[in-house]
Amino acid sequence: MPKPRVNRRSGSSGEVLVLARHPAIIAAATDVALRVSGRSPHLLHNPREALAALSRPGLPPRRVMLEPAVAGDSWAELLSTLDDPALTDAIVFVAAGPDGVPDGVAVMPPETDRMVAALNAPRPGNRRPPPHSAEALAAGLDRGALLVRYQPVVRVQDRRLMLVEALARWRGSPMVHGPDSFVPLVERAGLSRALAVAVVSGAARDMGGLAGRLPIGVSVNVSLDQLLRMDLASWIGRALRTGSLPAHRLSLELTETTEVHDLATLGRAIERIRAAGHQVFLDDLTIDDVRLRLMRLPFAGVKLDKALVGRLPHDARARRFVREVMAQANRAGQVVTAEGVSDARLWRAVAGLGVHRAQGFWVGRPLPYSVLPFWARSWAASPRG
């Protein structure tokens, strides 16, 4: 019998989430939670409760025990929420018998010692790394190996959801790969355009399908080379037609972190994109960033790098820099977004400086589009901020 699926990430102790109905599994899981975390588990009885718990703002549950039979039609949604290494430390599938276990899913019986060992075992790496050759990467993009996760961005003043940022992931086994493990490979293979098309197309399908429930915009990352290309607006338009997302709901984030010398050419490129209905933001602004002068160009706004945001509570120099950014942005009618807002302390810091928008784990984690409505309900009911 194959080994049960177990994923683990190092970190501080947190709650244990259990989705189960079988009495033996509930009893064993309760005992396990007390042994590994010192407290009772967060016990859930239906998949909608589990999706809501997994998508709520803040740090994710550190460990998850799941009875597959309880998932029902939500099995795929639960798996897509759990397979991102940013979301969980350990996942154990437990079953009292074969009934209701999907094909190919390895489970363990409700035996306390085995469950404890599984939750405490070192997390194995992905058995299937991202492909390295240009041909394999291109084939992966063609067959749908790219996944898109969406991180909420909210307005600080009233906590209103404004848009989500589309973040690329690559299918792995058993977890997805984060961008650091495959985006450099894609760029070296000359497939940055193909990657961007895949992300925009996926976002158009996903967010267009959510329009009736969450009529919000989505931002995608582009490099300077992509932004300067004359045909950028045309291929974005073709990609948007794969879904039903209006042009004005797609914005671009310029990820270039090196100094830009030809401001006139960049300004014309931004104007072309604006004429096609898209806003352009300057991403990852750092302290004393030489790119601060780019704010004179027709950017819709800037995003503060998470490292800069993390310094705000204790670093007066960082706060002075952000005040300078805010003054320039307010004069120009630009929006400033703080990235990496991971706790209440950082939320208060950016709010105190008048930053317009925020994103980060305190607000919401990168999630599959289908569970964003669950996050939205949790955020609306949350006292955060």
Image: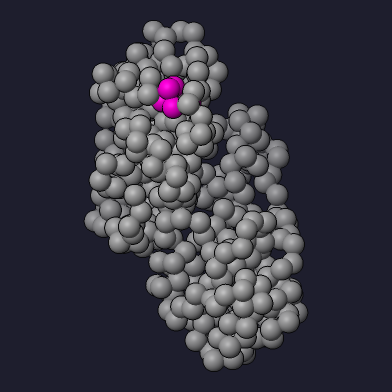
Where residue 146 sits in the image (x, y, percent)?
A: 54, 48
Name the side, left or right, on which 206 lies relative to 39.
left
Res 155 → quadrant? top left
Q: Which quadrant holds the N terminus?
A: bottom right
Name the side, left or right, on which 156 lies relative to 73.
left
Front-lying residue, 106 or 122? 122
Q: Main secondary structure of the magenta part?
A: helix
Residue 383, placed above or below residue 220: below
| Residue at (54, 92) in percent of width and height | 23
| Residue at (71, 40) in percent of width and height | 132
Where residue 316 sits in the image (x, y, percent)?
A: 48, 26
Q: Please indicate, yes or no, whether residue 90 appears anywhere in the rendered image.
A: yes
Residue extent of the magenta highlight: 318-322
Residue 193, placed above or below residue 207: above
Q: Please indicate, yes or no, whether residue 266 appears anywhere in the rendered image.
A: no
| Residue at (73, 82) in percent of width and height | 113
Number of numbered discs on residues: 0
Residue 374, placed above or below residue 301: below
Front-lying residue, 314 or 102? 314
Res 277 → quadrant? top left
Where residue 114 sits in the image (x, y, percent)?
A: 73, 80
